[in-house]
Amino acid sequence: GERVEVALATPGLELSRVVGAAPEGPHAVRVSASMDHALGEATERPLEVRVEGLRYLDYELPLLAARGALAPSELRVASVEVPHMTGDDGRLEVAGRVGFDGSVSATVEALLPEIDRDGTLRRLAPGVRGGVQASVRATISAGEDPQVDLRGRVVVARAQAPDLRLERAELEGSARGGLSAPTLDVVLSATDLRAGGQHVRSARLTARGGPTRYRVDGRASLADGTTADLDVAVRVDAGVYHVDGDVVARDLWQGPLRLRLCIALTVACRSVSGRYS
């Protein structure tokens, strides 16, 4: 067998002069790849890729290193390293495959103690801090109507942003089916949230159902003793999300305050439009 190595560097590349639709400004990246290229018909060939000094507009990535193998019908990923995010006290474990037919499967286990270690985040969102722990499994099928099967758990701890403090938030559940309207079974909970002068001791939101009808229920308990309950039905019809339900605030003034919701939302790739009544 033999080993093939390729390296590419583009310091200060003006990509807009090459691709008209690309944003203006310098871009830079150094990419190196090596593969054990066995002679004959090998079932798979080990592959290593390093991306260093990536700079695209306001985004920077100091180093990404990946290991895997190239097989006849798919690219297999054995590990991914992003050292500036994990440091010595974090970890990132990624494994999966990308099929040449468009199918994807992946498992991600991550512990990122401080997300503000990323220079891009510090620059674009100054003051945002916190730790993230995630355990996610995902598959996407091939074909014109890809089906997704996503399940896992994501925890955010000790999060901070301007005028916001959050001790802990946890999202756990699954999404299965079509990408535009999957079947959901999701629970979102949060504790000790302070924002906009309000202190929410605890909150819990559940979303279940699909692919055309969903039920969303929730409760939030404020530090002053007020509680707010959410009970909403969502119907999906021709790309429009019809929201119908109630928000009830209790232990407020002389009695409960009820707010009726009747909203129609249209979600496009880069915008959300709605009608309220």
Image (cartoon, helix red, strand yellow):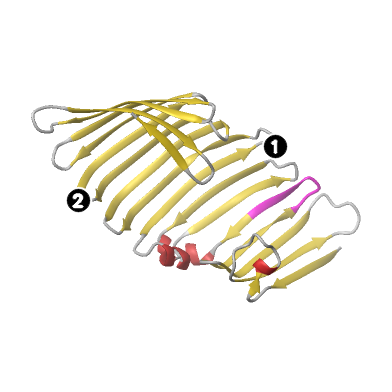
Q: Is 16 rendered above or below residue 194?
A: below
Q: Amino acid at mark 2?
A: Gly
Residue 166, which numbered label? none
* Residue 212 locus on image (x, y percent): 50, 24
Kindly identify the amino acid type of the residue bearing the numbered disc 1. Ala
Residues under numbered marks 2 and 1 in contact, where contact means CB atoms less than 8 Å apart:
no
Residue at left 37%, top 38%? 188
Looking at the picture, how far across and down is residue 110, in whole percent?
Answer: 49, 53
Q: Quadrant of residue 20?
A: bottom right
Q: Spatial distance from mark 2 to mark 1, Cα to Cα?
A: 48 Å
Tell me if 246 is positioned left or right of 59 in this view.
left
Going from N to C along the chain, the mark reached first, 2 or 1, is 1
Q: Residue at x 83, y 61 (%)?
A: 37
Expressed as whole percent of the image width and height from the top left, the position of residue 27 reads: 61, 70
Q: Which residue is under mark 1?
A: 142
Q: Is residue 36 visible?
A: yes
Q: Is residue 75 magenta?
A: yes
Which element type, helix, strand or loop, lies under badge 1?
A: loop
Position above or below: 109 against 128: above
Vertical placement of residue 40 versus 264, above or below: below
Q: How many marks?
A: 2
Tag 2 residue: 197
Q: Nearer the viewer, mark 2 or mark 1?
A: 2
- Residue ID at (38%, 43%): 170
Q: Is residue 181 above or below residue 169?
A: above
In the rendered structure, which segment of residues is drawn in magenta?
Answer: 70-78
Residue 81: x, y in percent? 57, 61
Helix, strand or loop for the magenta stretch, by majority: strand
